[in-house]
Amino acid sequence: MNRDSSRNSSGLVMTALFAGLAGGAAEILWAGAYAAATPLAVADVGREITVSLWPALAAHAAAPWFGAALHLALSFVLAGAFVWAVRRPLARAGAAAVWATSLAVLAAVWALNFLVLLPVLNPAFVDLMPYPATLVSKLLFGAAMAAVLVARGNAVTARSGTSEYNGTLIGSAIRARRA
């Protein structure tokens, strides 16, 4: 691996990390806003995330914080998997395709989570918020992730001095593979 491809690979990882942070933070902000407007305690959301993934910590006083940390860790994994999966198919696509794909994938993740996995793992989590509110949460994740991917894609390609992939998802990583 040459120095440029190593730099581009680390740029791809950083982009995925930023995308995951943005998506995870968008969901946390949405849950906070929803909780502020309803009787829901936002700490209950964090606690139920902990219950879903690490039930032994459910009674711990810091369970809501563990839930937030678990949520952000899963956000990084989800964005990383998304970037890895779509880096080639969307390499020449424009920003609209990145946005549409991000939103569609996150809607599918919502369906898998709330219609299949969570009813088995932790039915109480499913009952915390109505389906439309949880779907909005996932779509906000997708929107935040897409915004980062499009912005970072433009920033990375602009630095490279070529316009072949400007406006596309992680074009510099694709060029690195070809080099």
Image (cartoon, helix red, strand yellow):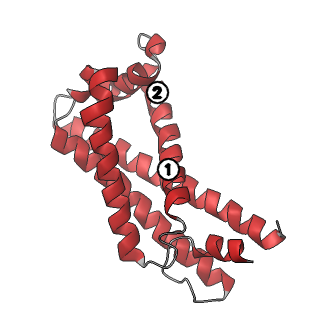
Discs 2/1, front: 1
Q: With 143 as the anchor, is 14 left or right in this view?
A: right
Residue type at tag 2: Trp
Which residue is located at x 47 percent, y 19 percent? 54
Taking 11 as reference, is 77 above or below it? above
> Which quadrant, please, contains the N terminus?
bottom right
Q: With 106 as the anchor, is 166 left or right in this view?
A: right
Residue 72 lies, in percent from the top left, at 49, 40
Label 1, secondary structure: give it: helix
Q: CA distance from mark 2 to mark 1?
A: 16 Å
Q: Report the residue marked by disc 1.
A: 21
Residue 177 lies, in percent from the top left, at 69, 71
Does residue 66 appear in this view?
yes
Residue 109 lies, in percent from the top left, at 34, 45
Which label number is shown at residue 65?
2
Residue 100 lies, in percent from the top left, at 32, 67
Residue type at tag 1: Leu
